[in-house]
């Protein structure tokens, strides 16, 4: 009986410690945005070039939702979603956020569809860009696309597309 009681005192804290360790191995909540987990194996972002290739891949795979959730500047996306969420006055906050994010996705898809040259140019940047990196900002340029640049922002370990028109 004493051995069983002693086993409980030893096993219970060990199980609690193992559970806490297992929770640490899950992706953190910061990596999940708008229902999309960060997937570096499919869409790497460690370098500016990797990030642009991932952006083009997301567009080609019709994953503009993932692009906005994980590849675009989070501050810009969050501001746009907040602006659209204010238009939805009824329902729970989570549902209004989902609707606002969905609206942003649809508008972005329409934007790409209305300007196919933009996607073609992004492919050129993914293939041929020369990157000028200063601090946490990268500007990519391609000699075949004069007057246009792609800007990326470094946050943590990843590069994100900035919404700058140039």
Image: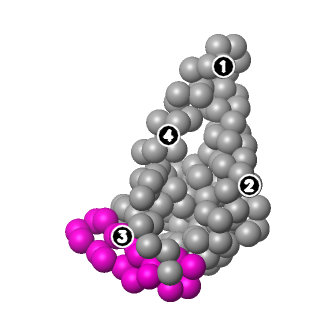
> Residue at position x 47%, y 36% from top?
79
Display colour scheme? one colour
Residue 139 is marked as: 3
Give the CA separation, mark 4 to mark 1.
Answer: 16 Å
> Residue at position x 62%, y 45% from top?
34
Give the structural element (helix, strand or loop) at label 2.
Answer: helix
- Residue depth check, mark 3 versus mark 1: number of the one nearer the observer: 3
Mark 2 or mark 1, which has the lower sequence index? 1
- Residue placed most toward the observer, 156 or 161: 161
Image: magenta residue range: 124-143
Residue 113 is marked as: 2
> Residue at position x 65%, y 71% from top?
120
Q: Position of residue 84 (x, y in %)?
A: 59, 28
Question: To which residue does mark 1 refer?
Answer: 88
Near mark 2 (Cα within 10 A), the count class, few <14, some 14-19 or many ≥20, is: few
Residue 121 is marked as: none
Give the structural element (helix, strand or loop) at label 4.
Answer: helix
Q: Position of residue 102 (x, y in %)?
A: 70, 39
Q: Is residue 138 magenta?
A: yes
Above or below residue 7? Residue 92 is above
- Residue depth check, mark 3 versus mark 2: number of the one nearer the observer: 2
Mark 4 touches mark 1? (CB < 8 Å): no
The answer to whether 110 appears left or right of 131 in the picture is: right
- Residue placed most toward the observer, 33 or 18: 33
Q: Quadrant of the C terminus?
A: bottom left
């Amino acid at each position: 009986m004493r051995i069983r009681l002693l086993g409980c005192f030893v096993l219970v804290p060990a199980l609690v410690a193992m559970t806490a360790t297992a929770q640490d191995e899950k992706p953190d909540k910061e990596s999940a945005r708008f229902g999309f987990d960060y997937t570096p194996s499919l869409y790497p972002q460690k370098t500016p070039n990797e990030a642009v290739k991932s952006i083009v891949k997301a567009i080609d795979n019709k994953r503009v939702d993932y692009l906005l959730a994980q590849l675009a500047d989070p501050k810009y996306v969050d501001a746009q979603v907040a602006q659209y969420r204010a238009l939805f006055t009824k329902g729970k906050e989570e549902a209004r956020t989902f609707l606002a994010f969905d609206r942003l996705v649809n508008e972005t898809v329409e934007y790409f569809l209305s300007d196919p040259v933009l996607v073609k140019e992004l492919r050129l940047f993914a293939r041929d860009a020369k990157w000028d990196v200063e601090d946490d900002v990268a500007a990519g340029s391609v000699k075949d696309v004069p007057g246009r640049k792609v800007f990326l922002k470094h946050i943590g370990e990843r590069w994100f597309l900035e919404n700058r028109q140039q």
